[in-house]
Amino acid sequence: MLYQIRNGTVSLGGNVILSHVNFEIKGSEKIAITGKNGAGKTTLLRLLAGELDLDSDDKRKGPGIFISRKVTVGMLKQQVFLDDSLTVEEEFKKVCPLEQETEYDCLFTKFGFKRQDKKRALSSFSGGEQTKIALIRLLLEKPDILILDEPTNHLDIETVEWLEQYLKQYEKAVVMVSHDRFFLDKTVDVVYELTEGTLVRYPGNYTHFREEKRKNYRLQQKAYERQQEEIKRLEGLVERFKHKPRKAAFARAKKKTLERMERVEQPKEEVTVFAQEITPLVLGSKWVFESEHLEIGYGKPLFEITMRIKRGQKIGILGANGVGKTTLLKTVSGLCAPVKGTYTLGNRVVVGYFDQHSGQIESEKTIVEHFHDLFPSLTEKEVRSILGSYLFKGKDGAKRVKDLSGGEKSRLVLAELLQSRPNFLILDEPTNHMDVQAKEALEAIFQAYTGTMLFVSHDRYFIKQVADAIMIIENQSVLYYPFGYEHYLEKQSHCAQVKAEEQALIIGLRSVPKAERHQLKELPTEEAYLDWKIRLATESMEKARKRVEFLEETKERLFWEQEGIAEKEFLEVQEELEHCFLEWHDACMEWGNLFFNWESEKTLRV
């Protein structure tokens, strides 16, 4: 155990921020702290960094914080430099010995700086650039506990991907707070959720944490409902027999059972939305968009693209700032004329367009009034139900539109857009300025949408959850990949591993006389598709197997429990177990057929 907090409490300004929390860092764990804004995440980081102390607490035994040995702690702070008149080189000489100069140069260039920038004064850099320089300095210090608060801010995707690999290989412990869920998935192996002043530890990455939380919510909700039924039954027996002399003792016994019963708390409402299917009003033609040698840009072309978008596709667009992503969306939607080339929208295609300016709405009306005026055929109950899917629940509906934050306004506009049910959504950064809960709600909604989507986003987790194909714009060209973002990353990783072998092969081919050269071919789409299907079938088979194991354990537990278990629940588990066995069997059969086809295709190719 490297570091541990036992039963710790922290108060600021008379308010309890952390209440009797337990927290631990083992060895070189990579830990994420997650929770709503204002939950106390930064307070916990400051406590770990030694900037805050635990409250004196008579209930706690011992000092509250235990450290196995003398450890160094480094934290990325907002006020990064005491003297910004120094040059970068002068600042780094304080922490960087000569033997680290190569690593220093590598880190400096990986974060997007040029070597000559080391001669510049710190004051000449922007706030975001100064934060990056402070992060580089912190990585060079290599503290035993590295504390990072939103480390991916001000970083482009390429730098974030490099930082992911660096932190995974970092030999010491890391504790971080980040809203970049994909970054957390790639780097952390433990997640602590901070809610209402308490901490709960979840082993695994961010996605595993979300799955476990949902599972725990469902189990606690079932336990709560089951206990409420039992309480109602016992109260009915007491009320029925308490005035009957022959049954009075029986009623008193049941009343004591009620009093001794340890109550199960009702779980806090899980805000993640499981949206119903959203179908466009008009189906539209098979090919939603087609272009031929279409040059995108303003006067001067940024790139040329020839493509077709099929009905039902959800395509995410990636690329650095300034490459033309937004210009492409405006051209496809008809808001910007192309430099050259032709394009057409399919028959009966209805476009719904959202960009960064769409959320700049002002109105004195409440959210419910504003939405109801746009869709007068809906009842108030239907309006509130729809708005609830976009996290405008209960009293939120009474807020005035003009008082909403930027993220809330964007959510409201997206609710209006989807309620109009176009068949082609074109979205530019739809999740900007939104917290994690809002992003997860929109992910569920866009997954339930059956129309076509073309969208730009810097949120890789959002792209992973929504897109079934991606486009990468770089070096004035466009790469189209027909599968999801994770599959693309897997292929990229594989390509990086064999890059040296490919280079050697190319050199060898160039040395062969021209007449004898063989053209290098790309991996056929059919083969890539089959490879992808096998992977999906394997995941489905494994998921079904785990569900069967869980149900077997649940069935055994229900069988041996003597009180408070209804026969109905046991039979439900038995029925679901049989259904899951069939799913598992089907998944195994599908995997076997796909693998046989793959082997056959491989044999034919040879």
Image: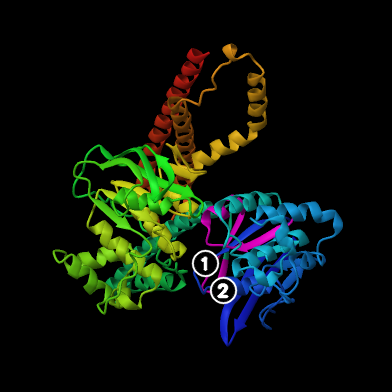
The magenta stretch is: 171-199
**Is label 1 in a helix, a strand or a loop?**
loop
In 3D space, how far apart are the residues under numbered discs 2 and 1 (Cα atoms)?
A: 8 Å
From the viewer's side, name the closer residue of 23 and 162: 162
Type of residue at label 1?
Answer: Gly
Type of residue at label 2?
Answer: Gly
Magenta span contains residue 61:
no
* 465 relative position to 150: left or right: left
Q: Which residue is mark 1?
A: 35
Residue 38, image x and y in percent? 51, 74
How crowded pointer 2 is (Cα within 10 Å; few <14, some 14-19, many 20+) is rated as: many
Which label was assigned to residue 40?
2
* 78 relative position to 308: left or right: right
Residue 265, image x and y in percent? 44, 68
**Is label 2 in a helix, a strand or a loop?**
loop
Which label was assigned to residue 263?
none
At x 43% / y 74%, what residue is drawn?
259
Q: Is residue 570 visible?
A: yes
Residue 182, image x and y in percent? 53, 53
Asked if the residue under mark 1 is in contact with the one under mark 2, i.e. CB atoms within 8 Å, the reply is: yes
Q: Could you tell me which quadrant the N terminus lies in? A: bottom right
The image quadrant that residue 441 belongs to is bottom left
